[in-house]
Image (cartoon, grey):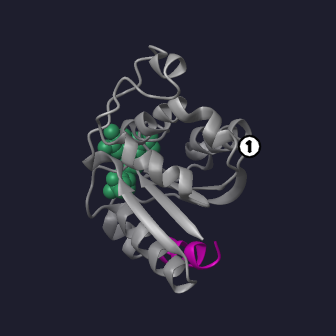
Amino acid sequence: MKILVLSGSPHKNGTTSLLIDEFYEGATQSGHEVVRIDTAKLKINPCLGCNHCRRNEGKCVHEYDDMLEIILHLLTADAVVLVSPLYYFGLTAQLKTVIDRFYSVNSLLRESPKKLYLIAAGADTDDWAMDGVRAHYKTLCKYLGWHEGGTLLAYGLAERQDAENSEYKIMANKFGKEI
Ligand SMILES: Cc1cc2nc3c(=O)[nH]c(=O)nc-3n(C[C@H](O)[C@H](O)[C@H](O)COP(=O)(O)O)c2cc1C
């Protein structure tokens, strides 16, 4: 299975990066192909809502930025894993910008059912802290007609060291292994 991991963190070696490394190890051990894209490192312009794509067979007005690379992987992936630190109880702007750009290929994505997964990490320990990302994840699955693969929601992780010492490290490996 081809798995596309879309990471939204700007930290190269932060909390979610560690969880992705563990996930990667587990998933590749199970024989999957994993493509990881760090969206914060790419040049992805925000959707302008101009509907140029609607009038031009899906061609975005930003056709020369890095989104094309993501779209090519998206269309050929069997599963997509959204990974984000919690920023103001939502996904990071970097990852949300990528998701907004799904718009230009909406119908292609909706015609191609995949499994969607979510890995999110935040400093908070309150259960409600993840309500926003959990709801967004479920709504995306519903809209795209993709299957809810599952979520790994990691609480109380302010920095990488917290993840190193937590059960979430093992859980991320298992999450990848059992995907
Ligand atoms: C701008 C900003 C907003 C944040 N908002 C939240 C939040 O709403 N809830 C939370 O639990 N943690 C919040 N955090 C903490 C991060 O989610 C946490 O430090 C996470 O481990 C960072 O992951 P990373 O190293 O992979 O980027 C915020 C951090 C930043 C920088």
Determine whether, in the image, residue 36 is placed left or right of residue 33: left
Q: Where is residue 172 in the image (x, y as percent from the top left)?
A: 52, 72
Q: In this view, does 19 lie above or below 101?
A: below
> In the picture, residue 141 is in which quadrant?
top right
Q: Where is residue 164 in the image (x, y as percent from the top left)?
A: 38, 75
Does the magenta-highlighted stretch encompass residue 175? yes
Give the residue pinned by disc 1.
145
Secondary structure predominantly adopted by residues drawn in magenta: helix
Q: In this view, does 46 lie above or below 123?
A: above
Q: Where is residue 169 in the image (x, y as percent from the top left)?
A: 47, 75
Q: In this view, does 90 lie above or below 38?
A: above
SS at badge 1: loop
Q: Give the range drawn in magenta.
A: 167-179
Q: Which residue is drawn at 67% across and 59% down?
A: 150
Q: Position of residue 103 (x, y in %)?
A: 53, 30
Q: Is residue 166 visible?
A: no
Residue at the outermost top position:
50
Q: Look at the image and tell me in which quarter the C terminus lies.
A: bottom right
Q: Is residue 14 above or below residue 93?
A: below
Residue nearest the viewer, comparing 127 with 59:
59
Determine whether, in the image, residue 122 is placed left or right of residue 45: right
Q: Can residue 76 be seen in this view?
A: yes
Q: Look at the image and tell me in which quarter the N terminus lies.
A: bottom right
Does the magenta-highlighted stretch encompass residue 85? no
> In the picture, residue 158 is in which quadrant?
bottom left
Q: Which residue is drawn at 50% across and 73% down?
A: 33
Residue nearest the viewer, comparing 131 with 76:
76
Q: Which residue is drawn at 51% across and 57% down?
A: 155
Residue at the outermost bottom position:
29
Q: What residue type is labelled 1?
A: Gly
